[in-house]
Image (tube, helix red, strand yellow):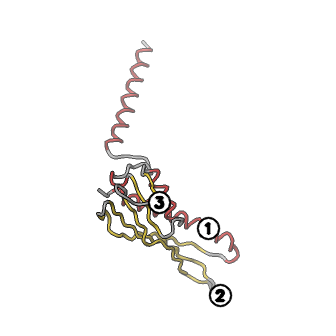
């Protein structure tokens, strides 16, 4: 009697697990960074003035992890993702009584466009993210490292925003 109940419970658990998996697949669930790109972006040439910027490096990694094949030059059947602007702006937000900056605003701005086969798939579109960080002159080296780390995070997040925009292309 006991083995029959155990066998029934295993079947029930398997059916429940299969139902959950099918429900997740049916609703469009996908692990982050694993969403397939549209067919027009299977082969991509990233055209950027600074090919070693934090954003371009993060964008290349995101495209590769999404299944795109990156090539070194444009051509037939190759989508060109143009990064026409890629710059960081740092602005003082507040100063101490001794007129020393205490808070900064770090803004990462890019502008992207996509063409394929002479057809514009995405018009130039500006994207930007902003973060605020505090500054202490007593910890100058640590704050410089914090700024660099924050810049990397902004670039990764901005590449994620750009990739989500690229998913909607035809």
**In the visual, does 146 lie left or right of 45?**
right
CA–CA distance in space, label 3 to label 2: 41 Å
Q: Secondary structure at mark 1?
A: helix
CA–CA distance in space, label 1 to label 3: 22 Å
Query: Circles 1 and 3: CB distance less than 8 Å?
Result: no
Residue depth check, mark 3 versus mark 2: number of the one nearer the observer? 3
Q: Which mark is residue 113?
A: none
**In the visual, does 37 lie left or right of 151?**
left
Tell me the quadrant of the picture where the N terminus can be found. Answer: top left
- Residue lying furthest top: 1
Q: Residues within 10 Å of mark 3 (few under 14, many from 20)?
A: many
Instruction: Locate residue 11, reporting x and y percent.
Output: 38, 23
**Residue shown at 65%/87% (left/top)?**
98
On the image, numbered disc 3 is attached to which residue?
59
Upstream in sequence: badge 3 or badge 2: 3
**Which is nearer the eye, 81 or 149?**
81
**Residue shown at 39%/46% (left/top)?**
30
Upstream in sequence: badge 1 or badge 2: 2
Tell me the quadrant of the picture where the C terminus can be found. Answer: bottom left
On the image, numbered disc 1 is attached to which residue?
146
**Which is nearer the eye, 52 or 154?**
52
Upstream in sequence: badge 1 or badge 3: 3
Q: Secondary structure at mark 2?
A: loop
Q: Is residue 25 above or below residue 43?
A: above
Q: Residues within 10 Å of mark 1 (few under 14, many from 20)?
A: some
**Which is nearer the eye, 42 or 118?**
118
Q: Secondary structure at mark 3?
A: helix
Query: Circles 3 and 2: CB distance less than 8 Å?
Result: no
On the image, numbered disc 2 is attached to which residue?
98
Exactly how many numbered labels are in the figure?
A: 3
**Residue shown at 41%/70% (left/top)?**
111
């Amino acid at each position: 009697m006991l083995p029959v109940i155990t066998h029934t419970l295993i079947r029930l658990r398997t059916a429940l697990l299969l139902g959950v998996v099918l429900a997740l697949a049916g609703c469009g669930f996908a692990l982050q960074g694993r969403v397939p790109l549209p067919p027009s972006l299977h082969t991509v040439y990233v055209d950027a003035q600074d090919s070693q910027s934090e954003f371009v490096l993060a964008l290349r990694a995101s495209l590769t992890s999404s299944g795109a094949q990156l090539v070194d030059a444009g051509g037939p059947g190759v989508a060109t993702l143009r990064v026409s602007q890629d710059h960081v702006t740092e602005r003082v937000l507040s100063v101490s009584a001794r007129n020393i900056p205490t808070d900064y605003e770090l803004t990462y701005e890019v502008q992207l466009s996509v063409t394929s086969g002479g057809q514009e798939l995405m018009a130039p579109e500006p994207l930007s993210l902003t973060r605020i960080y505090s500054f202490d002159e007593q910890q100058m080296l640590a704050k410089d490292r914090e700024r660099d780390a924050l810049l990397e995070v902004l670039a990764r997040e901005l590449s994620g925003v750009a990739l989500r925009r690229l998913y909607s292309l035809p």
